[in-house]
Image (spheres, rainbow, N blue to C red):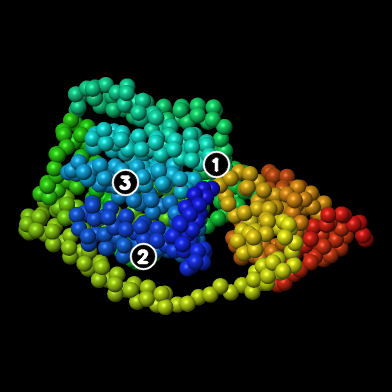
Amino acid sequence: MSLYPELIASVLYQATGSNEIIEPVYFYIGIVFGLQGVYVTALFVTSWLMSGTWLAGMLTVAWFIINRVDTTRIEYSIPLRENWALPYFACQVAALTGYLKSNLNTYGERFCYLLMSASTYTFVMMWEYSHYLLFLQAISLFLLDSFSLEQSDKVHEVYKIYVFSLFLGYLLQFENSALLVSPLLSLVVALMLAKCLQLNVKKGTFVAKIMKVINFYLVCTLTVTLNIIMKMFVPHKENGHMLKFLEVKFGLNMTKNFTMNWLLCQESLQAPSQDFFLRLTQSSLLPFYILVLIICFLSMIQVIFRRINGKSLKETVTLEDGQIGERPEIIYHVIHTILLGSLAMVIEGLKYLWTPYVCMLAAFGVCSPELWMTLFKWLRLRTVHPVLLALILSMAVPTIIGLSLWKEFFPRLMTELMELQEFYDPDTVELMTWIKRQAPVAAVFAGSPQLMGTIKLCTGWMVTSLPLYNDDDLLKRNENIYQIYSKRSAEDIYKILTSYKANYLIVEDAICNEVGTMRGCRVKDLLDIANGHVVCEEGDKLTYSKHGRFCHEVKINYSPYVNYFTRVYWNRSYFVYKINAVISFQS
């Protein structure tokens, strides 16, 4: 987990003298919210660059705000790494959009290149998963280059930015080996090697088509081979649990492992619900996005077939041509949004990467005369002058959408802004107060990762685990601590907790007596499956546990539980036990 965001925020806090004006927490929140402003501005600029009108930018912002439940997690998870990183990725996409434009002058191209370099590097430094998102972007550029839809030199300059950012990130993240074994680096190196081996043949000939296929196969083979070689020679801990999770997610493997099944049960890692699509449809975003995507995709396919047959692209595409698929930046965005959308259809949590660009692409499309002209050319419209109608629709449609959104959603937004809410959880507040007043300063607490994160933030006391799921060791530690809700003996639990130097144990009634979640996804159910205390599949052997569920038994205060644990505090939701340093065997 990258802590550079907090380091930068703390330096700014001290350097600007804000420590005399504002509390650190509000300064931190202000920076994160400010970055969200940068995020929306970058989407605004990207849409404007693609359509040529500020109306598209305004519509992008309106859709982003209205659909904010599905575009950002800033409202309820402020310190997430993605909230720091995605604004820089949006800036990078805006710069890349300008860089790919065919009619860009030298100074504009240089500015876009510098902005793209800075934002790509910053993005890599801010988020540990950034290289996966850049890998998808690199695939989009590779496909763009494969069909000769953009100047090859421009695309390879972007590849150099990737390599520079990865190696500099590797050094400044204290030799983070995950960047060296990332699929992005393997793909970029493979693309550069393939370019060196590429032969110059006349375009459109049979030999040229065969060479394209060979080049595509060579890049794919080299990427996989290089990645395997890098993983053999570079010591790494590159999110092995992610690969196992994907295997189970797609049905390629079955497991009783607690961590894998627990991840599968998380709402954010399941397929999107119908509510998600309903919300996008109610705001009119999804219908217009599908319309724009279909027109751009079909136009792109037309252009690709022309390129395969040896026809060259026009240097400047006019409105009368009705060929929106000839613009390289449009083709890039179509491919990129399809890749992101495919992932979002499998894992709901990835919708936060896809939906902002849905807003941007849909807004660009309805405001672009070229898109309407492309449609009219296919329909062979002759009753009205198509260029005039395209210009009228590119202004009328977004205006009508904007007015309808204003009428329907503006009152709701104002009502939400007027609402004042406050946190109310007296049991948790009482627990934090007790820890601050009664617990020794050197105490170490054990419990569920979510509660431990709260204790760490609210009290500063040491804890055995944290709600972080990007590290194999932390996941294993979390699984071991969760055994307090399994059917294990007091001695087993005692050995687990003391191995992590814990002094206090907190049992949560909400987990111990959990009934609300779907069957098979409760923590205690998953533990029973992992420990073999229930039958998971036909043919499984049932291992009988002679012990009751620990979290129930420890509350009764009888031997042997009282020998190992002494209750020191409780309320309606939490039971706190001191882990005895010296075991007393009292009957």
Query: Which secondary structure lies at badge 1?
Result: loop
Mark 3 Cα shell of 10 Å, populated few (<14), some (14-19), many (≥20): some
Residue 511 found in image quarter: bottom right
Q: Which residue is label 1 attached to?
A: 239
Q: Position of residue 208 (x, y in %)?
A: 24, 25
Q: Earlier in the sequence, mark 1 or mark 2?
A: 2
Asked if one can make out residue 438 in the rendered structure from this viewpoint, the answer is: yes
Q: Splitting the image into 4 quarters, where does residue 541 fall?
A: top right
Q: Which mark is residue 65?
A: 2
Query: What secondary structure is marked by label 2?
Result: helix
Q: Which callout, 3 or 1, points at the residue further toward the start of the chain?
A: 3
The amino acid marked with disc number 3 is Leu
Name the foreground residue: 462 vs 531: 462
Q: Nearer the viewer, residue 292 or 403?
A: 403
Question: Which mark is nearer the camera, 2 or 3?
Answer: 3
Q: Residues within 10 Å of mark 1 (few under 14, many from 20)?
A: some
The residue sitting at 69% across, 44% down in the picture is 540
Q: Position of residue 399 (x, y in %)?
A: 21, 67
Residue at position x 35%, y 57% from top? Answer: 38
Q: CA distance from mark 3 to mark 1?
A: 30 Å
Q: Which residue is mark 3?
A: 115
Q: Residue 504: x percent and y percent?
A: 75, 59
Q: CA distance from mark 2 to mark 3?
A: 26 Å
Tell me if 133 is positioned left or right of 292 in this view.
right
Snapshot quadrant of residue 502? bottom right
Going by the numbered disc 1, the residue's amino acid type is Asn
Residue in front for this viewpoint, 319 or 204: 319
**Which circle's residue, 2 or 3, is located before the other in the chain?**
2
